[in-house]
Amino acid sequence: MNRVVIVGASAGGLITAEALRRAGYRGVVTLVGDEPHPPYDRPPLSKQILTGEWEPGRLPLRRDDDIEALGLDLRLGVAATGLDVAGRTVELADGARVPYDALVVATGVRSRRLPGSEGVAGIHTLRTLQDALELKARLRPGRRLVIVGAGFVGAEVAAVARGLGVAVTMLEAGPVPMAQAVGEQAGRFLAQVHRDHGVDLRTDAAVREVVGVGGAASGVRLGGGTVLPADDVLVAIGSVPNTGWLEGTGLPLADGLVCDEFSAAAPGVYGAGDVARWHNPLFGTAMRVEHRTNAAEQGMAVARNLLSPEARRPFAPVPYFWSDQYDMKIQAYGHLRGHDEAVVVDGDIAQRRFLLAYRTDERLAGVLSVGMPPKTLRAWRAMVAAGAAWAHAVSTVAARP
């Protein structure tokens, strides 16, 4: 194998390249990224960059000399536009055609947009450094921000904006924010926290359109006709996997690049990070995880499997995510979606210090904590990783003094 091409120069792509070099691979590694910046960390975009706590110079994942030491064929600021699977060639926006022996798709996701919002000043999404800097420049005391979508990105921006003195209205289409991700109990808790901090959180809200004056956003019109005035609108209604360049290639595409338990989509083609929808044998289900830790872990697993196909191993992690909102750190392990039950097993929600355990069928599927010691959370993670039965997990807690 003489050349590995990695399309996507964020965490998943970079860490795949590093893992290849650590394993002794001496062939050509081409790393393609559509942004002009070297690989950088994205979680701080909705936190430290918006608050001004960090300057953009702190975002790069590695120093320039560390990147140089990898000996990469680095192609930044150019997107992949097509793929010839039979000919094993990636087509780039600058007209180049890059051959490969193995291909890693790590193209991540892009933000969903509201119809008719393109080119309207004051309408934002948050995915790139440029997005964050543009929004940061607008968040000033006394301004009005309407956030469409109350998922984790919307909630984190709401928390930052309130801390900066911005009037925030957050709109959620369902009855409980973040219920799909963390369940109704945790969702109701988080909703109350935002309301306690002055966010005008509106649930069951149907957005009809963004209202504009002179080419700039001036408000959001709801389904009933009410117009919420706004100086800026953040659209935080989820993301779409970047698989458009793979259309018509014959690769399996369904809410991402569909991969098996080894993160392989086809012979010589692997997926890593947010774009990959793979079968996780630990939970017996397909999943696509949009979190930094998963991208890094999957990148390492992909490098190992493509270099040692005769000894490849399933990628079966316990997914992890975290979110910082106000003075709270929210952390979770496991697969919380589609659970059957969520129970407070430690602490007290009223005190904003608790641990929720999630049951799917008769097994412990995951845990979520707010303000709990790391040691407590690690013990529960170990039980999730071991596939612990629900009754055993709960009885273990009940037996503690």
Image (tube, rainbow, N blue to C red):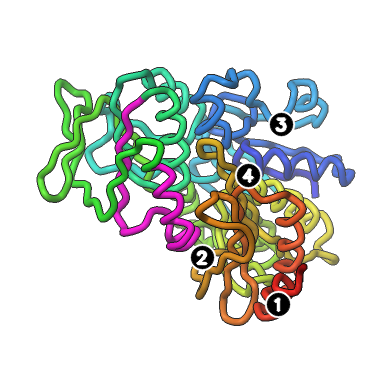
Tag of residue 395: 1
Residue at which label 4 appears: 292
Which label's residue is closer to the chain start, 4 or 3?
3
* 4 and 2 marks in contact (CB < 8 Å): no
| Residue 297 forms part of the magenta stretch | no
Q: Nearer the viewer, residue 213 or 384?
A: 384
| Residue 176 forms part of the magenta stretch | yes
Residue at which label 2 appears: 337
Which label's residue is closer to the chain start, 2 or 3?
3
* Residue in the image at 73% along x and 49% along y: 374
Residue at which label 3 appears: 73
Q: Amino acid at mark 3?
A: Asp
Which label sits in the foreground, 4 or 1?
A: 1
Q: Residues within 10 Å of mark 1 (few under 14, many from 20)?
A: few
Which element carries disc 2, helix, strand or loop?
A: loop
Q: Amino acid at mark 2?
A: Arg
Which label's residue is closer to the chain start, 4 or 2?
4
Question: Residue 38 occupies which quadrant of the picture?
Answer: top right
Q: Amino acid at mark 4?
A: Arg
